Image (cartoon, rainbow, N blue to C red):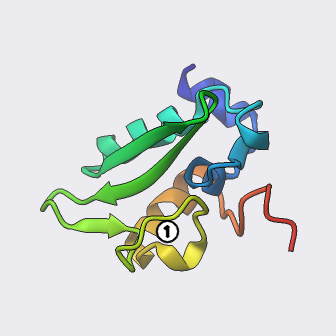
Amino acid sequence: MDWENILKKEINWLDAFDKFGFDDGYENEGYTDEIADFLEDNKYYAQSINAGGHNTYIFQIYDSEGERAYPIDNVSSRYGTRDMFPPKLLKLLDGRYGKSTKSEHIKS
């Protein structure tokens, strides 16, 4: 999938950090990998995990200095929320994909 295809759809980028994001993997369509590639193009290293055979999500990110940038509390999570990201990373992801407020799977 190329960037033009991604731009045609609104992407809630926080779903890439949630085990149950992108409709529990059903609608992933490679978005998690695309977001990881975008981060790497911007000097971050995103580590992903494939859970359950269909749920790929990013569980941690390191900056170009090798310092952990996500999650900021250094506690791995299966549910990414905005407060787990440093402002610089939020600005980067919001600027590319639009502001995500929460993963689609989180209803409250």
Look at label 1 and name its amino acid: Leu
Quadrant location of residue 99? Answer: bottom right
- Closer to us: 9 or 60: 60
Total tally of numbered discs in the picture: 1
* Quadrant of the image containing the C terminus: bottom right
* Label 1 sits on residue: 90
| Residue placed furthest toward the top | 1
Q: Is residue 108 above or below residue 65?
A: below
- Closer to us: 63 or 94: 63
Within 10 angstroms of label 1, few (less than 14), some, or many (20 or more) residues?
A: some
Q: Is residue 87 left or right of residue 79?
A: left
Q: Position of residue 6 (x, y in %)?
A: 64, 32
Q: Is residue 107 left or right of residue 35?
A: right
Q: Position of residue 70 (x, y in %)?
A: 39, 66
Q: Position of residue 13 (x, y in %)?
A: 62, 52
**Residue at 61% across, 34% down:** 52
* Residue 6 in sight: yes
* Residue 11 in sight: no
